[in-house]
Image: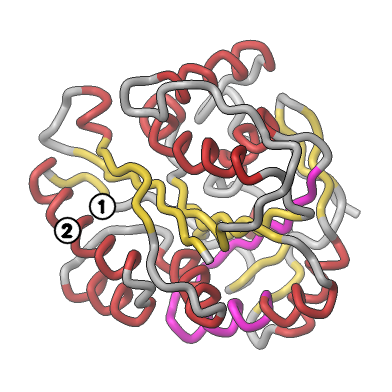
Amino acid sequence: MVNRKAVFAGQFYEADPEKLRKRIEWCFKHPLGPGSIPTASINRSKSSIGFISPHAGYIYSGPIAAHAYYYMAKEGKPDTFIILGPNHTGMGAAVAIWPDGVWETPLGGIEIDKELASEIFKNSNFAELDTLAHSEEHSIEVQLPFLQYIFEDFRIVPISMLYQSPETAKDLAEAILKAVETLQRDIVIIASTDMSHYEPQELAVKKDREALEKITALDPEGLYSTVIEKNITMCGVGPVMTLLYIARHLKASRGEILKYATSGDVTGEVSWVVGYASVRIPY
C-alpha cells in the first residue's frame, strides 16, 4: 500500500488548509464562478454520469471548475469518484490506475476504492496498476480539494492516461462499465482537461467551441479527429473520450456546458491564453 502526498500544494493551490478553503470559496463566489457557495445535498440524486473539469492553478481555472463541483454538490455524494486525468510527464504506464492506499491533500486523506480499482484493471487490455504515472502529475490532484470542501467520507479511483487514443479510451470505458456493474457502485466520473493552450483569445475560443460541439454531441471519435485536424492543444482528450464512450453506452443524449472561459477572461491578458470548460454529462 502506497500513500500519495500532496505534490502540488503550494503551487497550483494553497498549502495551508484555512487559506485553501478560502481560495475554494473565492472560486465559487468569483464573477466567473457559480456566484455562491454550494451546500451538499444529504439525498443522492443520480442525474449526472460525469463532469469535465479543468486543472490549472486555482487562480486561473478554479472559478470555471467550481461550476462542475457546484452541480455535484446538488446531486449528493456517490460511493466513489473515478477521476481520469492526462499524463503530462510521460512517466509510468499507458493507462495507470492507482491501486490502493490514501491520497493526501491539505484538507486530509482520501481513501482509494481498491476493490473498484482492481476490477477496472482486470477488465482492461491497456490499464496497469501503477503509481509512477501519478507521482508528479497534477491533473487529478487539483480536483480533490474541491471534492473535500463539499463532501466527507468518499472514495476515489485515480486513472492517468498517457496513451490518449480512441482505442485506449474505449477500452477503459468498457472496463469501467463492467467493473461498476459487477460491484454495483454508485459512481461519478470526473474527466480532467484544459482546452486550447497558449493561443490568442479569439483563436482559442474558436477552436474550443469546435471541440465542445463534439463533446456536447457525445461524439468521442469526432472530438479526436477535430482535435487532430484543427491542432487543438486540449491535453485531456483521452479522459474526455472515455467519459463520452461511457455516456454513449448509457444512452445519454447530450452534454451541457456549465461554463467556458479562458485565462484571459480571468487575468485580462488575451494574447496568450488557456481555455477552460466545465461540462456536465447527464443521464
Mark 1–mark 2 Cα distance, whole angstroms, equals 7 Å
Image spot of residue 36 (x, y percent): 47, 21
Q: What amino acid is at disc 1?
A: Ser
Q: Look at the picture and state if 158 lies above or below 40.
A: below
Q: Is residue 240 visible?
A: yes
Q: Look at the picture and state if 12 lies above or below 103.
A: above
- Find residue 223 and report its image quarter: bottom left
Residue at image position (54%, 82%) is 249
Residue at image position (35%, 77%) is 219
| Magenta region | 154-176
Counting residues from the start of the chain, the first of labels 1 and 2 encountered is 1
Q: Is residue 9 left or right of residue 139?
A: right
Q: Is residue 33 left or right of residue 72?
A: left
The reply to whether the magenta stretch includes residue 170 is yes
Q: Which residue is mark 1?
A: 196
Q: Which residue is mark 2?
A: 207
Image spot of residue 145 (x, y percent): 64, 32
Residue 217 disc label? none
Q: Look at the picture and state if 23 lies above or below 90.
A: above
Q: Nearer the viewer, residue 103 or 260?
A: 260
Mark 1 secondary-structure assignment: loop
